[in-house]
Amino acid sequence: MTKNEITDSDLRHMLRKAPSAPPSPWFTRKVLNRLPDKKKRLASTIEFSVYVIGIIISSIYIIGYMKGLMSNEATNLDIAILYGLVALLISMMYLLFSPFVYQRSASRATRHQ
């Protein structure tokens, strides 16, 4: 090791001696206000549209499939297909709405700091 190299323990020791910044509840808000606005991307609009179309198509297909099951006797394969379609519909709905939920909860967290 040469004289110019600083080990982790030396660095940790120097940082402990450094003065800490005064606590300020406005620091996070000031930093976030200086950030540029998010630009709406074309890809997010296309993704949103695909999810909405997928949800509509899945819902129509599930309703049609349910009508067919009610008029005939359902087999285990029919029930498995129905559960798969419902799971697909729920996952598409989650993917569609989760960005809004997480964005809203993140903005609440920064507001309360």
Image (cartoon, rainbow, N blue to C red):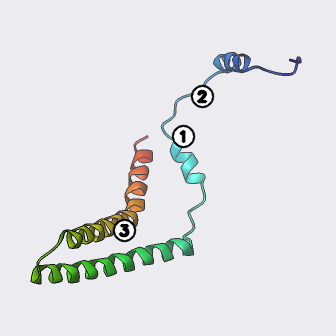
Q: Amino acid at mark 3?
A: Met
Give yes or no for contact between labels 3 and 1 (Cβ–Cβ under 8 Å). Answer: no
Relative horizontal placement of residue 85, taking residue 99 as reference (left or right): left
Count neighbours of disc 2 (C-alpha within 10 A) and say few if under 14, some if 14 to 19, many if 20 or more.
few
Do the residues under discs 2 and 1 have CB atoms within 8 angstroms?
yes
Q: Residue 17 or 102: which is nearer the viewer? A: 102
- What amino acid does circle 2 point to? Ala
Work out whether mark 2 precedes mark 1 in sequence or the reverse, and give the earlier one: 2
Q: Which mark is on residue 27?
A: 1
Looking at the rendering, which quadrant does residue 7 occupy? top right
| Relative to 2, residue 77 above or below | below
- The quadrant holding residue 18 is top right
Which residue type does callout 1 highlight?
A: Phe
How much space separates mark 3 and mark 1, taking CA atoms? 38 Å
**Residue 28, percent from left and from top:** 52, 43
Identify the residue position indicated by label 3 in the image: 92
Instruction: Give the crowd class for mark 1: few <14, some 14-19, many >=20 residues within 10 Å.
Output: few
Residue 66 rendering spot, x and y as whole percentages: 18, 78
Residue ID for mark 2:
21
